[in-house]
Image: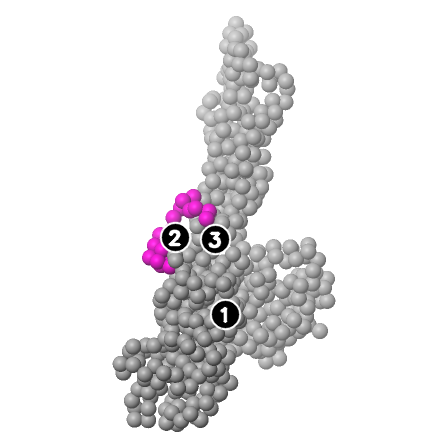
Amino acid sequence: MFQMVLRKIVWISTTALPLFSMIKIPRFRRMFTLRRSVNLRSLILWLCLSFVFLVLFSSLHAAYRVQQGLLLEQSVRVNQAYAERLAHASDDFLRSSAAVLKSAALDITAGQLDAAVIREEFKQVMEVTKAFDALVLVDVSGSVLAASPGAVFRNVALPLWPELFQGKAVPEPMVASAFQGGEGRWMTMVATPVFAPDGAYAGFIGGGMYLQSRSALQESLDKLSYEEGTYFRIVDGSQTIIYHPEQSQIGTTAQDVATVTEQPQITGRQSLPEPDEINPDQELVSVAAIPAAGWLVIAQRPTERVFANTSELLLRTLLLALPVFALSLLAIWYLSGLIASPLRQLATAAANLDNHADFRRIRFVKGWYVEAALIRQGLMQSFSAIGSRIRKLYQQGATDPLTGTMNRRGLDAALEEMTDAEQSVAVVMIDVDHFKAVNDRFGHALGDEVLKAIAELIMTQARREDVVARLGGEEFVVVLPETGLEAAGQFAERLRRAVAQTVFETVGSVTVSLGVACYPEHGNDLYEALALADAALYRAKADGRNRVHQVE
């Protein structure tokens, strides 16, 4: 796209502008035949136009490179944060699952390893959590004492931890590498030790998790996909794939793990290359560890998606600069005549030295320094105007720098697109309750962290096509296209509960109030629906906060 724009600029400079500047055919012939001399006005015009095109090209090229660099840097940070979020979520899932097993192990120890107690504990574990697809109790010799269902572990070499059988203290939980169960499906296992009543090690209780067939682990990971084109894998210590968007890849060996982890192509752990040094086939690769299991999360995103919008941004910059550029061309056309006029007057006077009237006119001809200053001023104004326009584009970015959501400008653009699409749209206004008290008590820095965390909760609850924006302060808005009032109310209630149930570091718990409206049921346009949702928000705050109010 960038090369196509450059070709258009070259075509304009070599074809369109000569036709524009040479309206009269005799002048056109005098310029290009060059039989005797070059027309001074044409020479000045072409020199000035050359400088203007140079400035325009340099400015556009600089804008293009800067935008690519910013997009690359931002995408690397987002990709790394995504990998770490996946690792954190997976680690929490495994540790919470192990906690359930630990409680069962204590009860089995208290029951003196009685078979009836073991069966009852297995039943309770399967009722308490959906994390496990099978349970097994293994003694110190590695023999299976009990299993539910038994077919899963039949004729299977169960993973063993040498530290347990040697009686050494080990950190919990223990998580096995991928292995095939008795039914031929790939699975992993979370385990915790079981002790005899006298305190001696008696074996371990393990919870098997299928890695395929829509298991609880698989479903919890599938929910964390955040953008089309971005995918992630989880591999264990033996480089076996634990999770992959394509289930056929689970259980296979990841051949590129060493390359990715030791010499990553593009990650946040190394200095970023220049955008033009990146192969289009390369990917953004970010790696994060899952401490509980010793697994690795590898998040990958094609670089071609990172730079997909740079050409469009460049074209917008060019279109915005065209009015100033056109005015500059007119100014140069006029100034070229102004510069040539004194020389023509001087030449006329010199050719008629015998005419005293013409000779006296020389005193009234302006000196060269005045016209030279005018040319310089025109070029500097052109450069300044283009540079000012580019800086203005950067200042008018559509992203809120604190939360990463859209700002008001980005929201307005999204609303205009939805208005043109003529679709039903729900609007949810969100305001953090008593946020001033949070800032006053804990400081603005922690207040900002709370805002960022709430923004993440909102984006987690929102769909990919929904628009999340921060209107300023502690107020957010979510625009849900193709959504009715009932579904929007359900979304708002889920979000309210999610915020209320979240414990923020140092600050503790906070709540939000929400107002819901739906276009075209409410308001003549989206902006009026937005105002009605805002009024509903204040109604929710007036009714006691931490609630959802819908426009009736």
The mark total stands at 3
Where residue 520 appears, as percent x and y from the top left, is 72, 64
Mark 2, Cα crowd under 10 Å, few <14 / some 14-19 / many 20+, is some
Tell me the distance, in whole angstroms, between the alpha carbons under discs 3 and 2. Answer: 11 Å
Q: Is residue 346 above or below residue 458?
A: above
Q: Nearer the viewer, residue 199 or 328?
A: 199
Left or right: 90 as drawn, with respect to 199 = right
In primary-sequence order, the first of circles 1 and 2 is 1
Q: Amino acid at mark 2?
A: Gln
What stretch of residues is rendered in magenta?
257-281
Name the residue at 45% across, 44% down.
65
What quarter of the picture does the C terminus occupy? bottom right
Question: Which quadrant holds residue 141?
Answer: bottom left
Q: Nearer the viewer, residue 403 or 250?
A: 250
Name the residue at 48% across, 82% down.
149
Name the residue at 52% across, 10% down.
36
Q: Is residue 464 above or below residue 175?
A: above
Q: Amino acid at mark 1?
A: Gln
Residue marked by disc 2: 265
Where residue 430 appears, as percent x and y from the top left, is 57, 70
Q: Which colouring convention does the figure follow?
A: one colour
Residue 261 sits inside the magenta stretch: yes
In primary-sequence order, the first of circles 3 and 2 is 2
The secondary element bearing badge 2 is classed as loop
Could you say which disc has been placed on residue 302 in the image? 3
Q: Amino acid at mark 3?
A: Pro
